[in-house]
Image (cartoon, rainbow, N blue to C red):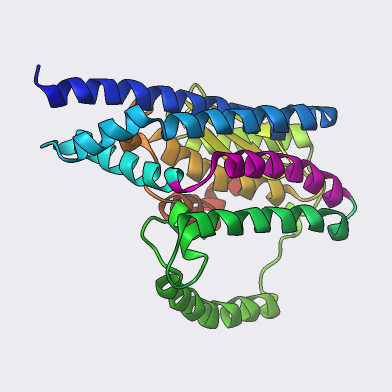
């Protein structure tokens, strides 16, 4: 076995261990939003901060840094080359951010979520505002640590949409806004459509049953995923075999749960369709834009189509 093969084997071991820490972080975050009692917030924030610190230590450990540098110069191909390239990219970013800042940001985000949940109950934004401002300030510190040219948001946008820049994305969004806002306004003003069928009382248990049918009809594997209730719908995937979706229910507004389920199922289908790379970068989502394209496609292009409702309306009417 040549030296690069030995190095890659050790690299794989360290990266998989790093992914295992991320797996635990993901489960703690999911549990906070789905299961955790309110009084568990302080302890959970501390635990998540500790794990974030452990993840940062492993991500920036000298041995892994040296392996990444050596393998970057090796003649690797295919998935191996991608794994090294993507690990180098994320590692170079992590090396610029102080561990203490990562820990503080993680703890603050955890506590701010609980503050948001409470403020949301009474639409009390002033109570939540200090938490939001603190998160913004910490994110600005991250951006300054990472470094950027042009807009400060370039340092943060790159986290979700690799290599994208505000200067490129901004004009696209501005053009869409100019076209879509009048279009949507005209549709709403036309009053040609009615949602009366969906705004009458619906038993929550029946909503859940119908939602699960929709999920499986779309192809979501409930043997490799689950559906729960949260304050706001989200998708959490630790691997293609463990993808967790949430929605929320309203007894007299069925579309709240239904379109939430369809949207998150789109995310879930993408997660379940990723290669099972055992924690290696090649098995990760390519970008948030691609991720969101899948959820929006199923929710809006399919879930809001005439054909879709012609198929499900008889069942829903029952």
Which picture quadrant has residue 70?
top left
Quadrant of the image containing the C terminus: top right
How many labels were placed on the picture?
0
Say which residue appears at 18% left-offset and 20% top-offset.
Answer: 6
Q: Is residue 43 above or below residue 293?
A: above
Say which residue appears at 64% left-offset and 33% top-offset.
Answer: 49
x and y percent of residue 228 in the render?
67, 31
Which picture quadrant has residue 28?
top right
x and y percent of residue 299 in the render?
54, 53
Query: Can I make out residue 156 in this image?
Result: yes
Q: Which residues are magenta?
A: 96-121
Outermost top residue: 1
Query: Can I make out residue 300 in this image?
Result: no
Q: Is residue 235 above or below residue 278?
A: below
Say which of 216 and 109 sits in front. 109
Q: Is residue 263 above or below residue 236?
A: below
Left or right of 210 in this view: 175: left
x and y percent of residue 191 in the render?
70, 75
Left or right of 163 in this view: 264: right
x and y percent of residue 242 in the render?
49, 26
Say which of 12 and 54 sits in front. 54
Is residue 116 inside the magenta stretch? yes
Is residue 120 inside the magenta stretch? yes
Magenta span: predominant SS is: helix
Say which residue appears at 27% left-offset and 43% top-offset.
Answer: 85
Q: Is residue 95 above or below residue 64?
A: below
Say which residue appears at 9% left-offset and 16% top-offset.
Answer: 1
């Amino acid at each position: 076995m040549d030296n690069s093969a030995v190095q890659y084997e050790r690299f794989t071991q360290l990266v998989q261990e790093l992914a295992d820490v991320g797996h635990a972080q993901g489960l703690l975050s999911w549990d906070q939003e789905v299961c955790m009692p309110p009084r568990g917030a302080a302890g959970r924030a501390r635990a998540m901060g500790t794990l974030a610190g452990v993840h940062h230590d492993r991500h920036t450990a000298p041995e892994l840094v040296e392996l990444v540098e050596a393998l970057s110069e090796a003649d690797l191909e295919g998935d191996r080359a991608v794994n090294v390239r993507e690990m180098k990219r994320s590692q170079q970013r992590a090396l610029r951010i102080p561990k203490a800042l990562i820990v503080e940001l993680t703890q603050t985000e955890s506590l701010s979520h609980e503050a948001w949940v409470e403020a949301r109950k009474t639409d009390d934004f002033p109570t939540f505002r200090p938490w939001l401002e603190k998160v913004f300030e910490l994110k600005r510190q991250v951006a300054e640590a990472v470094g950027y040219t042009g807009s400060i948001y370039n340092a943060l946008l790159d986290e979700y949409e690799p290599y994208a820049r505000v200067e490129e994305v901004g004009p696209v969004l501005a053009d869409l806004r100019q076209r879509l806002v009048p279009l949507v306004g005209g549709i709403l003003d036309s009053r040609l459509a009615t949602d009366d069928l969906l705004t009458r009382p619906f038993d929550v248990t029946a909503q859940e049953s119908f939602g699960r049918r929709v999920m499986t009809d779309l192809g979501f594997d409930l043997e490799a995923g689950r559906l729960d209730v949260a304050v706001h719908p989200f998708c959490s995937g630790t691997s293609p075999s463990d993808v967790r979706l949430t929605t929320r229910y309203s007894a007299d507004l069925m579309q709240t749960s239904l379109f939430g389920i369809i949207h998150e199922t789109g995310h879930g289908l993408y997660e379940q369709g990723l290669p099972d790379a055992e924690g290696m970068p090649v098995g990760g989502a390519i970008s948030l834009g691609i991720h969101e394209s899948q959820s929006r496609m199923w929710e809006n292009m399919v879930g809001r189509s005439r054909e879709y409702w012609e198929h499900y309306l008889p069942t829903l009417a029952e």
